[in-house]
Amino acid sequence: MADKNIRIPQYRQLYETLRKQISNGVYKAGDLLPSESELNIAHSVTQPTIRQALALLVNDGYIKKHHGKGSIVQELPTGLGILSIEGRLANSNSNVENLLTKIIDGPRITSWPDVMPFTPTQQELEDSCFYIERQRRVADTVVFYEFLHIPNHNLPRFASRSLANKSLYELLRTHYKIEIKGGEQKIWAILADDLVSHYLEIDAGSPVLRLERRIDTNRTDFSIYTSLYANTEKYILQGLI
C-alpha cells in the first residue's frame, strides 16, 4: 500500500494497472488496448487522465499509438534488460520470470563514500544516503551482484521496506512517485576479485562486466548511484538504451 501522505494521481494509477497487465501477459505484443471509451467505463476516469496514462506507456515503450487503430502493445525486450537506463530498469519487467533477489545488506542509512565513479550533487551530499547490497539469480545461476546508494531525502519508512524478490524501481515509483528519467553509465570488462567472485559464485579471476550508473529521476538533486557486476556466461544483457 502506498504511503497515505503521498497521493498517487489517477493517471499514474491507471498507468500502473495497464503496465502490469502488459507485463503479466494480459495484453500481448500486437494486441490492442481497450479504447479510451472502454477505459473510461472500466476505470471511471476522465479522458485527459486516460490520455496522460497512455502517453506514459508510449514514452516507456509499452505501446505505440496507431492512427485509426488505437494503442498497440509492443514487444518487450528479451534477455536481462539491465542496460536500459530509462523506463524498464534493472529487469523490473524482463521476460526472465524466475529472477530472484537476495538482499545482502540494507536498506540502511549511512554516509556517502569518499570516492564514487559519479559524484553526487552538493545537495545530495548534505544528506546521508541509503545503502543496499543485493544478489540476483536466475534459477541456479547468480547473474548480478550490485550495491546502491540512494539519497536519504523524503523517503519515509524506506529503511523498513522489504526488498527481497521485488523491483526496487517499481517500489520507488509506486510508493514515492520517483520516476526514472535517464542517466549515465560506464561499462567495461574486469576480472572478478575475491569479493565479486564470492557473490557471483564464480572463480576469482573470471571475466565479468562492471557497470557504474548514475540514474536520474524526476526529483531535483535525487539520483541513484549503483555499482553492478554481471555474470554473462549463460544470460546476455539486452534492453533499451
Image (cartoon, helix red, strand yellow):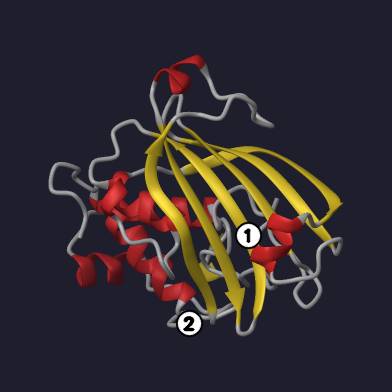
Residue 221 higher or lower than 85, as above or below: above
Question: x and y percent of residue 3 in the render?
Answer: 18, 49
Q: Residue at x 78, y 54 (%)?
A: 193
Other-residue count near label 2 (Cα within 10 Å), few / some / many at <14 / 14–19 / ≥20: few
Secondary structure under tag 2 reads loop
Query: Which mark, by number, is residue 82?
Result: none
Check disc 2 and report the residue beneath it. Answer: 25
Q: 162 left or right of 98?
A: left
Residue 88 pos. (x, y %): 55, 58
Q: Is residue 29 left or right of residue 20?
A: right
* Three-letter code for the amino acid on which mark 2 is drawn: Gly
Q: Residue at x 39, y 49 (%)?
A: 107
Q: Residue furthest left?
A: 4
Q: Which residue is mark 1?
A: 145
Crowding near the residue tagged with mark 1, few <14, some 14–19, many ≥20 C-alpha atoms within 10 Å: many
Q: In the image, residue 149 lies at what x, y percent?
A: 50, 39
Frontmost of labels 2 and 1 is: 1
Decide if residue 138 is on the left or right side of residue 232. Answer: left
Residue in the foreground of this view, choosing between 98 and 219: 98
Up the image or down, 141 lies above or below 132; here it is below
Quick one: SS at disc 1? strand
